[in-house]
């Protein structure tokens, strides 16, 4: 039997790029993708099979404030009953879905894609998962909420409901109240989705090392990647305050 020729360098590079997992991180309002890269990327420095993407939200004007935001910013604190600009949320979801579709078209398996985010970025991450027609590798929400009403439940496909969710929330969060996170996770469970809810009694609206270490292990486990030794604790991002406007 004739041996098959080795793949062309370009094809081999493309195959290698899509063979592992993709972590798409959505930042909180008033932040940028570059800031998130500095906070999150060090936790995955020992996992080259996981590619990282940190897009930046468009610049928008809210009153006299000009900042990066994925959709309209309601009054804070965010509660379990806060009404959102769902039209703006859906436009942002379409943008995320375009990124996902492009990645899948390039050869990445949807089950190797993880959408994650902090605060408003976490809210957009879970909304994007709920309305995406395919099962993804997972979704991680840090200090976020579900920015859609329960009327959207009928639009969540059986495939989307199979995407596992990891949710982190501090009970001392004064920006997105704990009740908002708890209600969001309960809504997912009502849909039949697997949602692991991690609570921290004294944590405010923060990203801390304990969360990010667990997050790294969770993604590695879902991708079947050997974790080796514990990741080093980044000196500049182990505890970051995010009093964004959501």
Image (tube, rainbow, N blue to C red):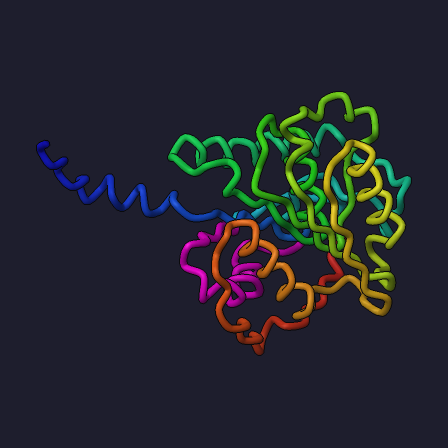
Q: Residue at x 69, y 32 (%)?
A: 161
Range drawn in magenta: 30-54
Q: In the picture, which quadrant includes the N terminus?
A: top left
The extreme front residue here reads: 1
Does residue 31 show up magenta in the picture?
yes
Residue 233 as seen in the image, left or right of residue 187 = left
Q: Could you tell me which residue is drawn at 81 percent across and 64 percent down?
A: 200
Residue 189 screen position, x and y as percent? 80, 38
- Is 1 displayed left or right of 88 in the figure? left
Left or right? Give the position of 135 relative to 107. Answer: right
Extreme residue in the top direction: 154
Counting from the top left corner in percent of width and height, residue 129 is at: 64, 36
Q: Position of residue 109 (x, y in %)?
A: 46, 36
Q: Residue at x 83, y 34 (%)?
A: 190
Of residues 4 and 27, the one nearer the viewer is 4
Look at the picture and state if 190 lies above or below 119: above
Vertically, is 52 above or below 151? Answer: below
| Quarter location, residue 70 | top right
Count of numbered circles in the view: 0
Q: Quadrant of residue 219?
A: bottom right
- Seen in the picture, residue 16 relative to 85 is either above or below; the reply is below
Res. 18 image quadrant: top left
Tell me the residue at 72%/67% (across/down).
241
Extreme residue in the bottom direction: 235
Is 39 contained in the magenta span?
yes
Foreground pick, 44 / 4: 4
Residue 193 pos. (x, y %): 73, 37
């Amino acid at each position: 039997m004739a041996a098959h020729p080795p793949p062309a360098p370009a094809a081999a590079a493309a195959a290698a790029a899509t063979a592992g997992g993709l972590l798409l991180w959505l930042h909180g309002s008033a932040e940028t993708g570059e800031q998130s890269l500095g906070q999150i990327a060090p936790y995955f420095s020992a996992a080259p099979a996981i590619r990282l993407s940190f897009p930046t939200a468009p610049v928008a004007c809210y009153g006299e404030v000009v900042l990066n935001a994925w959709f309209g910013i309601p009054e804070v604190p965010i509660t379990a009953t806060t009404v959102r600009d769902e039209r703006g949320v859906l436009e942002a979801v379409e943008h995320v879905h375009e990124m996902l579709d492009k990645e899948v078209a390039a050869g990445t398996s949807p089950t190797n894609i993880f959408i994650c985010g902090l605060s408003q970025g976490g809210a957009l991450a879970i909304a994007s998962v709920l309305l995406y027609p395919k099962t993804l590798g997972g979704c991680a929400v840090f200090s976020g909420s579900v920015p859609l009403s329960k009327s959207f439940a009928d639009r969540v496909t059986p495939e989307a409901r199979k995407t596992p969710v990891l949710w982190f929330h501090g009970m001392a969060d004064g920006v997105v109240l704990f009740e908002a996170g708890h209600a969001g996770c309960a809504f997912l469970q009502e849909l039949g989705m697997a949602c692991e809810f991690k609570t921290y009694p004294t944590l405010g609206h923060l990203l801390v090392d304990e969360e990010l270490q667990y997050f790294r292990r969770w993604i590695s486990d879902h991708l079947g990647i050997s974790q080796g030794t514990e990741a080093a604790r980044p000196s500049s991002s182990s505890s970051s305050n995010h009093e964004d406007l959501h």
